[in-house]
Amino acid sequence: MNELSSLGLILLLALLAGHLVQFLRVPEVTGYLLAGVALGPSVLGWVSHENLQALNVLSEVALGLILFSVGSVFHYARFVRYGHRIFYLTVVESLAAALLVALGTVIAGHSWQVAGLLGAIAIATAPASTLMVLRECNSKGPLSDTLLGIIAVNNILCLAAYSLAAACIDLAAGWGNSGALIDTFYGSVYPLIWQLIGSVALGFLVGLLLAGWATKVNEQGEMLMLLAGSVLLCVGVARILELSALIASLAVGGTMVNLSARSRGLFHTLSRTDPPFYAIFFVIAGADLDVSLVPSMGMLGAYYLVARAAGKFWGARFAARRLGLEDVVQRLLGFGLMAQAGLAVGLVLVIDRRFPDHAEIVSTVVLSSVVIYEMFGPISTRFAVMRSGEARPDQPEPVSLID
């Protein structure tokens, strides 16, 4: 099957799966993922590895659009008002998950290097599936706003934690040779600085372009062309410069929402026109999942599943209680932080190249866990949103993220 027929099949099956799962009262994103698993190489094989590689650019564009939307939570007035609590919540739930995973890994007899890498990856929460559920439920309220803020900051923190763990591993390997130690320190710290500052700078520059040009565009179709072109440019340049497309796309959204008076219309246009990209992204993500890895996850994989979930849930509950947030946020926030996918898989690929001695066990644990988390996470998020009373599934217009 060629790429065009694969793409057509992906869209049609995504539409069918989205309708079918409504009878089961599970999120559409779960239906998309299941459709992808069925189509992918690990089940029917109708979409091959080669097809997935060819369609990967569409997946990256979709992720860029998703993160652009998430970046709207960095509106200056909102972030000044709520930023300190979002940062505190994110740090506490992330550290709780990382420490539980890392300590258990060491106690189980594995090296501190493996423990550090798994702990860093455990921090990541998938922004795409969480945002998809919030949009599907037309959710708005304290819980939804807090979730959006956390998923915007969480993955930045995960990248920083991974860079720190990687630097410690490199420094330990070069210990005893002062010359090599200096080179190792520079080689470990520089990528972190470049990834964070460079990615934000790229997103800011593209956001400036988008905000300036948006004043000259009135027609909705042209607005969509401008947005798609800006996101494509951002993701493409980030790949060339080895920056984080995730952080850069967030920065584009954050810049746009703060500098352009037309940002509300732009985000509204995006919310009405991007469902095909979302469907493609999640079906391809499902096709990339290798369900055959689940039986091989072993005791460490099972522990990773439980420890990460427990750390996220109780860490979020503890932090929300310390901040005196609404009762609904205290009780349900942790349920919205279970999903894990894109960044975790990306870090596994980096570890495969950078730390081959530790890659096998890290890859098996994380990739097998991602299969389960991607299925369970959106359902958990939907449960939290529905129980909170913030869902408005019958509202005809999607809720704006910048209201």
Image (spheres, helix red, strand yellow):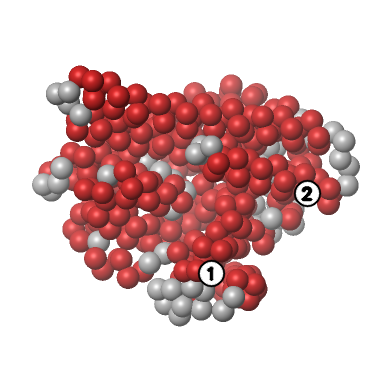
| Mark 2 surroundings: few (<14), some (14-19) or many (≥20) residues within 10 A | few
At x 38%, y 62%, the residue is 371
Q: Position of residue 146 (x, y in %)?
A: 52, 37
What amino acid type is highlighted by mark number 2? Met
Residue with the mark numbered 2: 225
What amino acid type is highlighted by mark number 1? Asn
Residue closest to the eye, 153 or 255? 255
At x 64%, y 24%, the residue is 76
Asked whether the viewer can see residue 293, the reply is: yes
Residue 199 lies left or right of residue 308; in this view the side is right
Mark 2 or 1, which is nearer the eye?
1
Q: Position of residue 166 (x, y in %)?
A: 30, 35
Asked whether the viewer can see residue 257, the reply is: no
Residue 78 lies left or right of residue 229; in this view the side is left
At x 42%, y 77%, the residue is 43
Residue closest to the eye, 130 or 220? 220
Name of the residue lying farthest toward the front: 179
Quarter holding the C terminus is top right
Between the C-alphas of marks 2 and 1, the distance is 26 Å
Residue closest to the eye, 159 or 66? 159
Q: Position of residue 149 (x, y in %)?
A: 53, 36
Image-quadrant location for residue 365: bottom left
At x 47%, y 28%, the residue is 194
Element marked by disc 2: helix
Element marked by disc 1: helix
Residue with the mark numbered 1: 51
Q: Is residue 324 above or below residue 357?
A: above
